[in-house]
C-alpha cells in the first residue's frame, strides 16, 4: 500500500512535468506508462483524422481514377445536407416548368440565365469550378446574388464524372444549359491546355453522363461567333463555312459543334448550339474590351484600339445580355426531348445551331466614344495594328433563323446597354471595397 502510495505520488499532476525518481523500477514503469499513454493518444488522433477524412469526403469516390484527369481539383460534395440543397434548388415551382442543370452558373451568362429561369419558376441547379481565369471574387459575388434567389451552385468541374452522375441520380434534369467553358481568344496562346480541358474533354464528359442518364436531358450549349473565323461573307449565316478558325478558342468551339453532332447521331441526344456574338452587360467579364476599357478610362490609363490593315475598322456585333438570355430560354423551351434511353438511341433527335447576335456591328472606336460620354472622361486612345493572336476584324450576325424558330428579337442598342453596364460597374466597384482588378 505504501509502495502504491509512493508510486501514485510520482505521477505528475501536470502532464509533461515529471518528478524524477531515483528508483530504476519505478522509473521504468513510469516510462512504460508514459509511452502507453502517448501511443493511445496518437492512435486516437490517427483514428480521428481517418474519420474526419471519411465523413468529409463525397459519398462516391472523389478521386479521379483516370490518369489524364489527375490535374482535377477535388471539391467537397455529397452527404444528406448537400443533396437536400441540390433537390431544393432544382425543384420546379411552376406549372409546365423545367428542371435545368446550368453549367458555368457563376459566369457572366450563366448567372443571368439561372436568375431568369428561377424567376419564372423553373428548377435550377448551378455547377461551376470557380477558376481564376478572371477575378474569382466577381464569381463569388454572382454566386451570392443567385443564392439570394434560391439557386445553389455546386462547386465542381464538368470533367468530374462521379459528381455529374451523382447530380443526375439526385435530380432527373429535363434540360442542361451548358455554359461552362474556357472563354477568351488571346489567353489560348498562354494556356492552351485549359481550352482542351473545359471545351473539349469537359464537354465530352458531360455528354457521356447525359447520354446515360435516364431520362436523357435535352441540351442547349454555348458555341461562339468565333467559329466563323476568317470567313469574309457578311452577315454570318449558319450555312456559311466554319472551317477556318483564327484561334484555338474558336477551334475548340467548332470541335464542340462536331462532337454535338456525334452524340446526337449515336445516342439520340437533343442538342442545340448557340453562337453568341460579343455579349456585354452588368456582371460582365473583366477580360472583355468594354469592361477593361471602362476600368482603364476611369484610371486615366491609355487604351489600345485595334485597326486592321489599311486603317480598316475593327467592329463587333455587340449583343446585350438580356437579349442573349431571351434567346437561351427560347432555345430551352423549343428543345425537343432526347430520344435515347439506357445509353442507346431510339430514334432521330433534334440537332440545331443558331446565331444569337444583334445584327448591327459597331466599330470599337464608337464603343469608346459612348463610354467617354457615359463616364464623362476622355479616353487616352492608342491606335494599334490588330495583332494576329486570334481576334478577327469584324463579326456580324444574320439572325433570321433564330427569329423564325425561336422568336428571337434583340431589342437593346449599344448606347442603352452600355448605360446599364456603366451604372452597374460604378455601383459594384464604388466605395473602394473592391478594386477593379
Ligand atoms: N460572353 C461572350 O461574349 C461569349 C461569346 C461567345 C461565346 N460565349 C460562350 O458562352 C459561355 C458563357 O460565357 P461567359 O461570358 O459567361 O464566360 P464566363 O467565363 O464568365 O463563364 C464561364 C464559367 O464557366 C466556369 N468553368 C470554366 N471551366 C469549367 C469547368 N471545367 N468546370 C466547371 N466550370 C467551369 C468558369 O468558372 C466560369 O464561371 C461560354 O461557353 C463562352 O465560351 C461567350
Image (cartoon, rainbow, N blue to C red):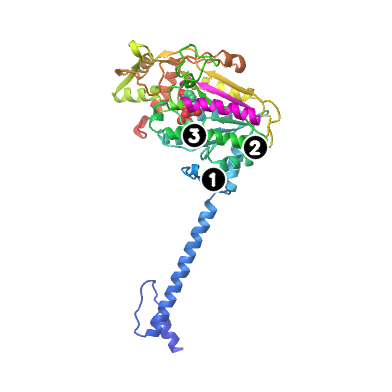
Please tell me whether residue 48 belongs to the stretch shown in magenta: no
- Per the image, label 2 sits on a secondary structure element best described as loop
Work out how far the residue at label 3 is from the one at label 1, CA to CA, in angstroms: 20 Å
Please tell me whether residue 263 belongs to the stretch shown in magenta: yes
Work out how far the residue at label 2 is from the one at label 1, CA to CA, in angstroms: 20 Å
Instruction: Please tell me in which quadrant of the rendered image residue 416 appears.
Output: top left
User: Which residue is denoted by mark 3 in the rendering?
Assistant: 198
**What is the chief secondary structure element of the magenta stretch?**
helix
Horizontal side, residue 180 vs residue 386: left or right = right
| Labels 2, 1: front one | 2
Q: Position of residue 308 (x, y in %)?
A: 36, 14
Of residue 95 and residue 369, the one placed in the foreground of this image is: 369
- Per the image, label 3 sits on a secondary structure element best described as helix
- Image mark for residue 77: 1
Q: Earlier in the sequence, mark 3 or mark 1?
A: 1
Question: Neighbour class for label 2 at 10 Å: few (<14), some, many (≥20)?
Answer: many
Question: Neighbour class for label 1 at 10 Å: few (<14), some, many (≥20)?
Answer: some
Horizontal side, residue 407 vs residue 419: left or right = right
User: Which residue is denoted by mark 2 in the rendering?
Assistant: 213
Q: Residue furthest right?
A: 346
What residue span does the magenta drawing correspond to?
A: 250-279
Amino acid at each position: 500500500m505504501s509502495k502504491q502510495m509512493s508510486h501514485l505520488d510520482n505521477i505528475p499532476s501536470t502532464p509533461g512535468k515529471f518528478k524524477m525518481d531515483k528508483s530504476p523500477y519505478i522509473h521504468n514503469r513510469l516510462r512504460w506508462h508514459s509511452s502507453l499513454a502517448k501511443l493511445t493518444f496518437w492512435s486516437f488522433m490517427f483514428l480521428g483524422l481517418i474519420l474526419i477524412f471519411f465523413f468529409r469526403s463525397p459519398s462516391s469516390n472523389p478521386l479521379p481514377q483516370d490518369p489524364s484527369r489527375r490535374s482535377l481539383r477535388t471539391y467537397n460534395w455529397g452527404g444528406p445536407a448537400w443533396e437536400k440543397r441540390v433537390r431544393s434548388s432544382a425543384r420546379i415551382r411552376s406549372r409546365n416548368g423545367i428542371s435545368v442543370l446550368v453549367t458555368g452558373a457563376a459566369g457572366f451568362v450563366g448567372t443571368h440565365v439561372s436568375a431568369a429561369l428561377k424567376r419564372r419558376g423553373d428548377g435550377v441547379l448551378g455547377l461551376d469550378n470557380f477558376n481564376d481565369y478572371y477575378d474569382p471574387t466577381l464569381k463569388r459575388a454572382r454566386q451570392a446574388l443567385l443564392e439570394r434567389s434560391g439557386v445553389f451552385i455546386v462547386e465542381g468541374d464538368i470533367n468530374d464524372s462521379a459528381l455529374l452522375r451523382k447530380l443526375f441520380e439526385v435530380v432527373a434534369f429535363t434540360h442542361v444549359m451548358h455554359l461552362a467553358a474556357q472563354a477568351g481568344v488571346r489567353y489560348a496562346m498562354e494556356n492552351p491546355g485549359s481550352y482542351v480541358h473545359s471545351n473539349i474533354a469537359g464537354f465530352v464528359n458531360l455528354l457521356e453522363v447525359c447520354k446515360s442518364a435516364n431520362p436523357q436531358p435535352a441540351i442547349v450549349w454555348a458555341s461562339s461567333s468565333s467559329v466563323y473565323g476568317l470567313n469574309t461573307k457578311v452577315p454570318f449565316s449558319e450555312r456559311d463555312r466554319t472551317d477556318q478558325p483564327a484561334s484555338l478558342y474558336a477551334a475548340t468551339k467548332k470541335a464542340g459543334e462536331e462532337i454535338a453532332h456525334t452524340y446526337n447521331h449515336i445516342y439520340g441526344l437533343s442538342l442545340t448550339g448557340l453562337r453568341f456574338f460579343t455579349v456585354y452587360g452588368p456582371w460582365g467579364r473583366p477580360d472583355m474590351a468594354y469592361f477593361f476599357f471602362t476600368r482603364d478610362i476611369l484610371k486615366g490609363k491609355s487604351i489600345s484600339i485595334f485597326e486592321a490593315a489599311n486603317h480598316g475598322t475593327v467592329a463587333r456585333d455587340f449583343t446585350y445580355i438580356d437579349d442573349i438570355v431571351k434567346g437561351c430560354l427560347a432555345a430551352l423551351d423549343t428543345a425537343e426531348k432526347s430520344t435515347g434511353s439506357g445509353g442507346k438511341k431510339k430514334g432521330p433527335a433534334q440537332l440545331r445551331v443558331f446565331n444569337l447576335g444583334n445584327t448591327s456591328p459597331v466599330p470599337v472606336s464608337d464603343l469608346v466614344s459612348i463610354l467617354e460620354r457615359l463616364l464623362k472622361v476622355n479616353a487616352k486612345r492608342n491606335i494599334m495594328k490588330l495583332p494576329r493572336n486570334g481576334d478577327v476584324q469584324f463579326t456580324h450576325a444574320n439572325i433570321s433563323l433564330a427569329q423564325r424558330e425561336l422568336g428571337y428579337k434583340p431589342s437593346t442598342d449599344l448606347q442603352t446597354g452600355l448605360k446599364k453596364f456603366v451604372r452597374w460597374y460604378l455601383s459594384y466597384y464604388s466605395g473602394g471595397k473592391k478594386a477593379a482588378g
